[in-house]
Structure formats: structure tokens, C-alpha cells
Amino acid sequence: MTRSRSRVDGPRKLAFAGFLVCAGLIAFALYLQYVKDLEPCPLCMIQRVVFIALGLVFLIAAFAGPRGAFVKVYGVVATVLALIGVGFASRHVWLQWFPSPMESCTADLFTQLERLPFASVIERALYATGDCSRIDWTLLGLSIADWSLLWFVVLAGLSLFYATRKPRRRGDWL
């Protein structure tokens, strides 16, 4: 293996690991929806979209094998997406910890997208009550929203590491 090839392998492996995490999370979300019959709320659907976008950035970075400044570009884009996910997941966790006293369920995300402007759908999802505050499933005492927040924080850390990590030696990236 040549030195130039080994310099590219570190970022590729890291990006592919990020993609695998996102793909695994989406697969698990689909399992919960279609096997366990848990219907996602609007905030869950928005978080899925962010996980998919983040996974695609990681996948493109893994296949492109960026070097130099392009590693930073992919890392920054992934970090921004992960932080957007942290924002949505934080709002979701907050709604579950402090549910509204009045139950007012909203239509599912796709119905809202057909009938309302995109910005209005996002605003309604952020102010959602009802379905978004309900906890249908837990693992180790954490709800789906809690796990989503945790994984967005982990992926933000991975993205920052990806964007800022410099090789210790010429051929040693990780």
C-alpha cells in the first residue's frame, strides 16, 4: 500500500463508520415503525430526514476519499447537519419531559407537507404537542427522542473529529 493511499484510507473509514451508524439508526426506526407498529410523530420524521442527509454526506465522503481542504468541507457539512439534528432532538426531548396539558395532535408529516408551506411544517413540528410528547418505547430508560439526541451528539463529535483531525505522521491519519 502506498503512502498516499494510506492517507486517504483514514478519512474514508471514519466517514464510512458515520454512514453505517446513520444507516443502522434508520433501519432501526423502520423496524420500530413497521414491525413494532410505532407511528412516528412529525419531529421523528424530521429527525429521520436529518439522519438520512447526514448519512449521505458520510457516504459521499467515504466514496470520494477527499484530501486536504475537502476533508474539512465534508466534516463541516456533516457537523452542521448533526447540530441541526441536535436542535430538533432537543426540542423533542423537551416536549417529552414537559408535555403540554392539552392534547392536540397534528396530522402526519406527509399530509402537512402536501397542504402547508415547508417553513410552516417545520414551525408546527417544533411547536408540536400530543404525539410528539408521548413516549411509546424505551431502552435502558431512554425514549426514542433521548436516543436520537444522544446519537446526534455522537455524530456531531465524529464530524468535528473528521473535520479537525490531522495526521500525527505523514501516513498515519487515525
Image (cartoon, helix red, strand yellow):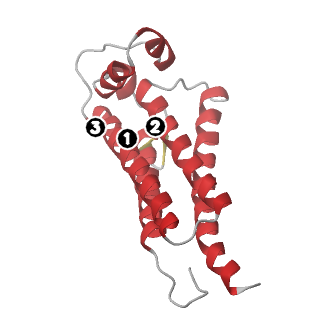
Q: Give the Cα separation between the discs numbered 1 and 3.
A: 8 Å
x and y, in percent, of residue 106 in the image? 38, 14
Q: Eyeballing the image, is 151 above or below 46?
A: below
- Say the numbered circle drawn on residue 13: none
Tell me the residue that label 1 is attached to.
89
Snapshot quadrant of residue 174: bottom right
Query: Is 134 left, or right, of 35 in this rendering?
Result: left
Amino acid carrying mark 1 in the image: Ala
Q: Give the Cα separation between the discs numbered 2 and 3.
A: 15 Å
Instruction: State the residue at coordinates (51%, 17%).
Output: 110
Tell me the residue that label 2 is attached to.
47
Instruction: State the residue at coordinates (50%, 88%).
Output: 168
Which quarter of the image is occupied by the N terminus? Answer: bottom right
Q: Are marks 2 and 1 in contact (CB under 8 Å)?
A: yes
Tell me the residue that label 3 is attached to.
94
**Is residue 141 shown to the viewer in this render?**
no
Whichever of callouts 1 and 3 sits on the residue coming sooner in the sequence is: 1
Amino acid carrying mark 2 in the image: Gln
x and y, in percent, of residue 93 in the image? 33, 39
Whichever of callouts 2 and 3 sits on the residue coming sooner in the sequence is: 2
Q: Which is closer to the viewer, label 1 or label 3? A: 1
x and y, in percent, of residue 123 in the image? 30, 24
Q: Secondary structure at mark 2?
A: helix
Residue farthest bottom in this picture: 169
Amino acid carrying mark 3 in the image: Trp
Q: Are marks 2 and 3 in contact (CB under 8 Å)?
A: no
Instruction: State the residue at coordinates (51%, 83%).
Output: 167
Snapshot quadrant of residue 8: bottom right
